Amino acid sequence: MSSGEKVCLECGKVIYGRSDKRFCDDACRNAYNNKLNSDQTNLVRSVNNILRKNRRILLDALSGVGMVKIQREKLKRLGFDFKFHTHTFSNNKGQTYSFIYETGYLLLENDWVLIVQKKPL
């Protein structure tokens, strides 16, 4: 191999073709980028899994009704993680709802939780 030859960043094979080419094929390009992004991808995947599970638990509790009260402990037993939500909403009464996409909840007194669902746009 002469000093002017470029090698694939993933497998080290000599690259032929365009002068700005960095990988010998798509498989090497994908493998390289997957390794590079694996930590961020795993974090995002983990958070999305928790959000999906939380959303499913809230939707199951609603069971087609627009609003329902449930005990906080029951949500915890079902695996609901109160640390994860997509956004919050404060109404004019000063109450702050936590939402997982279109489904939200409001923490009430005596360990009760009010579950609500936004109307579709």
Image (tube, rainbow, N blue to C red):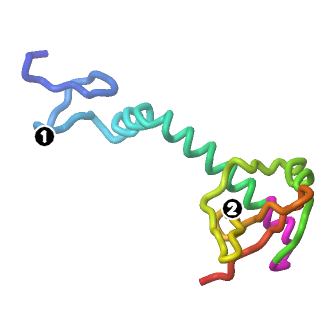
Q: Which residue is mark 2?
A: 98
Q: Is residue 63 magenta?
A: yes
Mark 1 or 2, closer to the camera: 2
Q: Position of residue 112 (x, y in %)?
A: 89, 61
Q: Callout 1: helix, strand or loop?
A: loop
Q: Nearer the viewer, residue 81 or 26?
A: 81
Count the marks.
2
CA gap, disc 1 to disc 2? Answer: 52 Å
Say above or below: 5 vs 111.
above
Q: Residue at x 34, y 37 (%)?
A: 29
Q: Earlier in the sequence, mark 1 or mark 2?
A: 1
Q: Which residue is mark 1?
A: 18
Q: Residue at x 27, y 34 (%)?
A: 23
Q: Residue at x 80, y 68 (%)?
A: 115
Circle 1: residue type:
Arg
Q: Position of residue 16 (x, y in %)?
A: 16, 33
Q: Is residue 15 left or right of residue 30?
A: left
In terms of secondary structure, what is the magenta stretch mainly?
A: helix
Which corner quadrant holds the C terminus? bottom right
Q: Is residue 12 left or right of residue 108?
A: left
Q: Position of residue 120 (x, y in %)?
A: 64, 82
Q: Nearer the viewer, residue 103 or 49?
A: 103
Q: Is residue 72 magenta?
A: no
Q: Is residue 80 left or right of residue 87?
A: right
Q: Position of residue 27 (x, y in %)?
A: 38, 38
| Among the 4 quarters of the image, the one containing residue 21 | top left
Q: Callout 2: helix, strand or loop?
A: strand
Q: Residues within 10 Å of mark 1 (few under 14, many from 20)?
A: few
Magenta part of the chain: 57-66
Say above or below: 78 vs 12.
below
- Which label sits on residue 102? none
